[in-house]
């Protein structure tokens, strides 16, 4: 048999494309809901979680809107809109519920393998920004999700909270910060590996590394023909799947386009790359214990919000600053330079052009970032760490993100900075597009996907009971019920050893 021929494999219930946090979460949930499901997982690289879920490619922040200022925009009338912050905070609480379920049921051995308590702080300087941060705090602290938030404009207090940020700073400079001790650092690479290591031990589940999905075609019976190439051996296989999830990060757009479902038309992608400055001085690393987020530059994407970031990577404390944004035509860190160009078609070229015209500040910002020198990067770091020395830091490549561009009836095309699930009307295929807050809200996103694509089963008494077993608050609103939210937090904080 030549390598141009495909070997036919049996029909499977579920195909998951991409071995990242989204596929891992969905696969584990589905296996809990229906243990007899057969699942085939395909990953183009030779390791799991090596793209968006990897520790160095992911912000690592348990995104709960404690410190991320882009989730609390200031409106034209001067007020601060906290609606998105409340939504994201609730989604992260749901993630912690599910992760607690994994610990309680011995699916993951120890929470310390992937989650750590790290205070979250927002830090700004200048009269205008200080006024904004004060208004933000006053709005947030009224909601029970943020009731424990602290705020200060006192230099001595801020010195205690974040010594590296305050030392060497002009004493006359107007500064302020807020702090949430409930913040977390999450190693999504470690979490993803733990989930897949459990999944691949379950009956009916097969994980295939170095397997690239080449094509997707819908059959008349509603199932999907999936064509896959083993890039190590050159062998090709095809199989039929009743349901397909495309969780391939930046690679999802191309596969969604190959599916040719009506819902996919008009979607495009804009790639943004990144870099970190990584501290190599143990004394400096030890003196900082927080995720300190600032305000994004005008026109910058959310993934580029600067932060001086305490991380736990492979059990070792690390300190990063960035990310510095960049531009590459690749859709994946290990992708092709032709990715952007091959994603353009007759259906999305107009929305992409219109979004490009409307986002000229972003283009200018990316050009300025790409042309930065080492001195420019150090100067940006010194805004957050005035006494930083260049010899204590080295440049490392961060992840690649693809921001969603989609049709808009009023504007022609818009650039979206969040995550979006695109699913066929019959629920037989779904793809996840976009970036931040992504991984942190993966549990809520996958629950919504299950409700949408497995509608009949999800409404059954059996699945409802199991969903509530995994997520005790399921079907209720923690955002509206302070008692439920506080009880849930107390329980998950204990289980996750935070």
Image (spheres, rainbow, N blue to C red):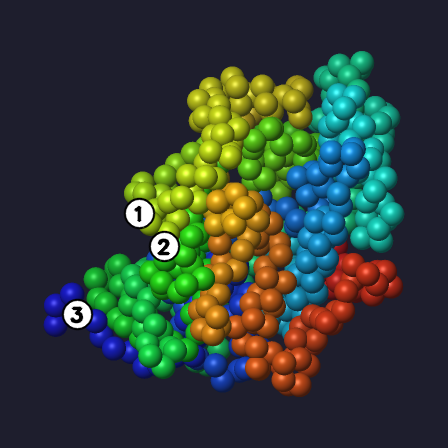
The picture quadrant where one finds residue 191 is bottom right
Q: Which residue is identified by label 1?
A: 342
**Residue 54 % position (x, y):** 50, 50
Residue at 48% across, 77% down: 202
Q: Earlier in the sequence, mark 2 or mark 1?
A: 2
**Closer to the observer: label 1 or label 3?**
1
Q: Is residue 174 above or below residue 467?
A: above
Query: In what element is the residue under mark 2?
Result: helix
**Residue 11 % position (x, y):** 35, 81
Horizontal arrangement in the rendering, residue 161 relative to residue 36 (left or right) = right
How much space separates mark 1 and mark 3, taking CA atoms? 25 Å
**Foreground of the two, 145 or 409:** 409
Q: Where does the N terminus fall, quadrant-wise? A: bottom left
Q: Total label count?
A: 3
Horizontal arrangement in the rendering, residue 40 relative to residue 362 (left or right) = left
Q: Earlier in the sequence, mark 1 or mark 3?
A: 3
How much space separates mark 2 and mark 3, taking CA atoms? 23 Å
Q: Is residue 160 above or below residue 291?
A: above
**Residue 68 % position (x, y):** 68, 41
Residue 318 in view: yes
* CB atoms of marks 2 and 1 within 8 Å: yes
Q: Where does the C terminus fall, quadrant-wise? A: bottom right
Horizontal arrangement in the rendering, residue 236 relative to residue 326 (left or right) = left
**Residue 241 % position (x, y):** 38, 76
Query: In what element is the residue under mark 3?
Result: loop
Q: Which residue is identified by label 3?
A: 5
**Closer to the observer: label 2 or label 3?**
2
Q: Is residue 232 above or below residue 410?
A: below
Q: Which residue is identified by label 2?
A: 254
């Amino acid at each position: 048999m030549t390598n141009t021929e495909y070997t036919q494999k049996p029909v499977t219930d579920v195909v998951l494309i991409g071995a990242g946090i989204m596929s891992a979460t969905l696969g584990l949930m589905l296996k809990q809901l229906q243990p007899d499901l057969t699942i085939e997982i395909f990953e183009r690289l030779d390791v799991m979680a090596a793209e968006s879920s990897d520790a160095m490619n992911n912000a690592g922040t348990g995104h709960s809107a404690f410190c991320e200022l882009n989730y609390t925009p200031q409106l034209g009338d001067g007020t601060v809109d906290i609606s998105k912050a409340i939504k994201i905070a609730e989604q992260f609480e749901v993630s912690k519920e599910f992760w607690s379920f994994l610990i309680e049921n011995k699916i993951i051995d120890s929470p310390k393998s992937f989650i750590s308590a790290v205070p979250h702080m927002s830090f700004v300087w200048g009269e205008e920004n200080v006024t904004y941060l004060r208004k933000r705090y006053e709005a947030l602290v009224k909601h029970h999700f943020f009731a424990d938030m602290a705020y200060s404009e006192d230099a001595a207090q801020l010195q205690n909270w974040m010594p590296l940020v305050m030392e060497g700073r002009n004493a006359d400079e107007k500064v302020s910060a807020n702090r949430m001790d409930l913040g977390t650092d999450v190693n999504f690479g470690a979490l993803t590996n733990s989930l897949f290591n459990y999944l691949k031990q379950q009956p009916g589940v097969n994980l295939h590394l170095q397997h690239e999905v080449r094509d997707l075609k819908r059959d008349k019976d509603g199932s999907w023909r999936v064509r896959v190439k083993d890039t190590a051996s050159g062998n090709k296989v095809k199989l039929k799947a009743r349901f397909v999830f495309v969780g391939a990060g930046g690679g999802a757009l191309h596969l969604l386009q190959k599916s040719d479902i009506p819902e996919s038309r008009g979607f495009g992608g804009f790639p943004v790359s990144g870099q970190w400055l990584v501290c190599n001085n143990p004394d400096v690393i030890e003196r900082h214990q927080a995720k300190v987020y600032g305000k994004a530059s005008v026109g910058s994407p959310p993934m580029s919000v600067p932060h001086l970031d305490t991380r736990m990577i492979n059990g070792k404390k690390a300190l990063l600053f960035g990310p510095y944004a960049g531009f590459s035509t690749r859709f994946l860190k290990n992708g092709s330079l032709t990715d952007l160009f091959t994603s353009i078609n007759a259906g999305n070229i107009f929305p992409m052009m219109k979004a490009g015209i409307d986002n000229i500040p972003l283009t200018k910002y990316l050009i300025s970032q790409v042309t930065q020198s080492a001195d420019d990067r150090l100067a940006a770091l010194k805004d957050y760490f005035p006494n930083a020395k260049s010899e204590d830091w080295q440049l490392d490549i961060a992840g690649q993100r693809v921001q969603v561009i989609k049709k808009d009836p009023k504007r022609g095309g818009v650039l979206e900075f969040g995550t979006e699930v695109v699913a066929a009307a019959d629920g037989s295929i779904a793809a996840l597009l976009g970036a931040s807050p992504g991984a942190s809200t993966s549990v809520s996103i996958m629950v919504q996907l299950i409700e949408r694509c497995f509608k009949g089963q999800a409404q059954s008494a059996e699945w409802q009971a199991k969903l509530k077993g995994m997520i005790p608050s399921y079907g209720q609103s923690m955002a509206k019920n302070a008692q439920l939210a506080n009880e849930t937090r107390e329980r998950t904080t204990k289980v996750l050893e935070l």
